[in-house]
Amino acid sequence: MQKTIRLDGLRLPVSIGIHEFERKQPQEYVLDIMLGLPDEYRIDSDDIAQAVNYDALRDQVTALLGSQHFNLQETVIQRVLDICFRLDDRVGWVDVRTRKTQVYPDCESVGLHYRVMRDKWIALTPKDGNLSKHLSQKHVIQVTVKPSRSGRDIR
């Protein structure tokens, strides 16, 4: 049995990118977040305090992405993973996909995909607790680029 909580297609204006045109204004950024829960995950009553709070997940991710300019998607996805694992100890794994939709005129999007188990993520976390500044590109699991169907120039 697999139990998950999904936050799909979260679209936010985010200041992200290394190119000059990306620094001028926020661009659409899309996230899909899936939290893996243990088979034993159950609630005993209709009380939000017993559940994994996906409102808090959405609020924290939205606040993070509106808080500063990010150069790299790697930084964003790693900070989102930190949020997901801090959200609730019952979250055993996290799957996050990110996409910038306005970078290349010949692509629908460019993004990253990380799927990480809690124990692996915690093992990578340095003593100062700031994993994002210590990770390198070797931790990228998948980079996804889809051809654009519209062919529009979005710069």
Image (cartoon, rainbow, N blue to C red):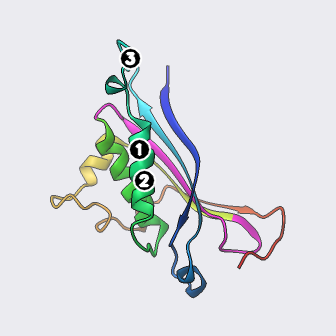
Report the Cα–Cα distance between label 2 and label 1: 6 Å
Q: Of callouts 1 and 3, which one flags the residue occurring earlier in the amino acid sequence?
A: 3
Residue under label 1: 57
Q: What residue occupies the far top of the structure in this picture?
A: 44
Distance (Cα) linking label 1 and label 3? 19 Å
Left or right of 26 in this view: 137 = left
Q: Nearer the viewer, mark 2 or mark 3?
A: 2
Residue at image x 32%, y 23%? Answer: 50
Q: Look at mark 3 in the image and give the residue it sits on.
A: 42
Above or below for 24 versus 102 = below
Residue 70 placement: quadrant: bottom left
Residue 40, located in which quarter of the rendered image? top left
Range drawn in magenta:
89-108
**Mark 1 closeness class: few <14, some 14–19, many ≥20 residues within 10 Å:** some
Report the Cα–Cα distance between label 2 and label 3. 25 Å
- Residue, disc 2: 61
Q: Amino acid at mark 1?
A: Leu
Contact, CB < 8 Å: mark 2 with mark 1?
Answer: yes
Q: Quadrant of residue 77?
A: bottom left
Amino acid type, mark 3: Arg
